[in-house]
Amino acid sequence: MTYTTLLPARMGRLELRNRIVFPAMVTNYCSTRGEVTDRLVAYHQERAKGGAGLLITEATYISPDGKSFPHQLGIDDDGLLPGLRRLVESVHAAGARIAVQLCHAGRQTSRAVTGLPLLSPSVTRFGNDETSAMRQEDIDRVLRDYAGAALRAQKAGFDAVELHAGNGYLPQQFLSPFTNARQDGYGGSLENRVRFTVEAIRAVRAAVGPDFPIILRLGVAEPVSGGLTLEDGVAAARILAREDIDAFDVTAGMREGGMWVTPPLALPRGTHIEKAAAVRQAIQASRPVIGIGRITSASLADSFIAAGKVDFVVMGRALLADPELPLKTLQGREEDIRPCIGCNEGCIGRLSRGLDICCAVNPRVGNEYRPLPRRVASPRHVLIVGAGPAGLVAACTALRRGHRVTVLEKEAACGGKIPLAARPPFKEELAGYAVWLERQARDLGADIRCSTKATPSLVSELAPDVVLLAVGSEPVIPPIPGLAPERFLLAEQVLQQGPTPGQDVLIIGGGLVGCETALFLARNGCHPLVAEMREDLCMDIEPRSRAVMLLHLKEYGIRTLTSCRVDRIGEGEAVLCRTGHAEEHLPCSRIVLATGYRPRTALAEALRGMAVPVHSIGDCHGGTRICDAVWQTTATVETI
């Protein structure tokens, strides 16, 4: 099939081999001075080799006081040019184009990162810091910094620059009434608030001349009270379309609305396409428009392009998960594309903690500069017990190294807990990851035996050289008086069997599993109440995913109690104790337990006396997430 997305296209002055843009995503792979490293070069070159048309560097700081991450890429000094040239040359050698994103964080940083006072349009607090309102001399200096950075980009050989006026960075801070309370020519009316962005574009254009491409990443909406509305964002785009720019890259959100910046699995694919379409219509398609928001395939991208909503598409996390997505699509190998699961754990989740990024499902992210493990000279027979994500990742990794692999799975199908995890609302596409893993393992030659329980005698009979246990975890049953087996169901049983509509259900445990089970029940006509001992819900998941989860709980009207302990279970009721409240007797027709898991260790103990090495991986090693299973498993198998 021929996809429009994969055909050559022009973005203003820029000729590209296709319409796929790998966007700016901070990696934290650079030196503290913002210098390009071998790690950053290999990371970008991998995406260029995989077939993306245009790569955009991460938010690249133009001024020392505009740096927002400790190991962020910089372009504020001529001394950085040699590394930037090396980055450009590596991407060009792989057939792609590359732009540098020019960024000033404004208030979205900290003194801990910059060592300098924070600047923003108005005095605000951000984290532990208070920002200073920019004076005219500050504005003039930052505009000069944009121009100087753009000129360096041109000298380094970049094909374009992208001016970042979205995601809560400085130009958006001027545009947004949430962060701009100025009373001068840069505040008040929309025309005044957009003035800083206009002047930044003009400063960059004056520096690079008439022929160099300029892309504008524009934030057009903020999901906060008093923030930028889509109406104003689109009106700003109409004003900015009068300037000499080549394309609009339409985004939304800022640090306070991070779930919009990096939409998790629970938000629909193509999250911001309609916003991009509104901009394209408002400017009468006078400039190409780039659409973003968890676009995961060429077919999905084509649907947006065919509908006239966008001209180009961003594929960010999808190309972290599989850099070869464009190439595999061109080759008709869509089934081989490793799916992004939208978990945000390895990428933005790590970045928000000040760490370097990785990918939950692709352990090569951040390791592209390291040689792949060599195939072994003496293949071994690797026996893997369990065909969940850890077991299947182990099988694929071992097979690629040249080992012979047998997988025993006690259930009738592979996937472990993934099929159950895909049952709650908004998570259905997670099931595709289990399908992909199984297909990869079988195609590589794994001998997978389902409906086969591993026992010490069977393990001995198979005579493996190495045993990897991926037997998962088992639910924790809390010692609550009156909690007899006939009075409760486990959350995984509910997800497996389905609910009985109309029941008043008490869910004990308000972590991810408990809240997702509540949504599953509410969507099927039940009336769940979630009781959580901690002071808040979903404390065990990435913040952006948590924010969406809390919105869904509110949308479905699910009752929740926090700082709440279930003291005992009576006939048809539960007795609850909450801090600062009298004892409560809660009628409930069904109790569901979502009180956590512990590693399964029985088989490991039974095999302890065997002469062959036995390693536990995944949940039975103490992992709790797919990210843990993939990375720890890969590291273990690469030592075999």
Image (cartoon, rainbow, N blue to C red):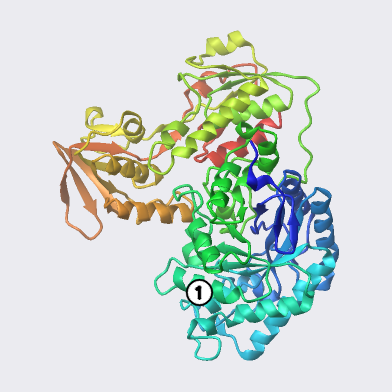
Q: Report the quarter where the C terminus lies.
A: top right
What is the x, y in percent for residue 36? 78, 60
**In the displayed structure, would residue 339 be above or below residue 301?**
above
- Asked whether, in this view, residue 299 is left or right of residue 525, the answer is right
126 or 185: which is nearer to us? Answer: 185
The residue under the point 56% across, 79% down is: 194
Q: Report the quarter where the N terminus lies.
A: top right
Please, what secondary structure does the residue beneath circle 1 have?
helix
- Asked whether, in this view, residue 79 is left or right of residue 434, the answer is right
Q: Which residue appears farthest toward the top when viewing the image?
A: 461
* Tally of numbered tags: 1
The kind of residue on which mark 1 rests is: Ala
- Asked whether, in this view, residue 629 is left or right of residue 595, the answer is right
Is there any visible trace of residue 519 in the rendered image? yes
What is the x, y in percent for residue 143? 69, 81
The residue under the point 57% across, 13% down is: 459
635 or 254: which is nearer to us? Answer: 254
**In the displayed structure, would residue 3 be above or below residue 183?**
above
Q: Which residue appears farthest toward the right when viewing the image?
A: 82
The residue under the point 24% across, 37% down is: 591
Which residue does the numbered mark 1 point to in the structure image? 235
What is the x, y in percent for residue 104? 64, 73
296 or 475: which is nearer to us? Answer: 296
Is there any visible trace of residue 117 in the rendered image? no
What is the x, y in percent for residue 485? 25, 28
**In the displayed structure, would residue 27 be above or below residue 151?**
above
**Which picture quadrant has residue 23?**
bottom right
**In the displayed structure, would residue 400 be above or below residue 230?**
above
The residue under the point 79% across, 63% down is: 158
**Which picture quadrant has residue 428?**
top left
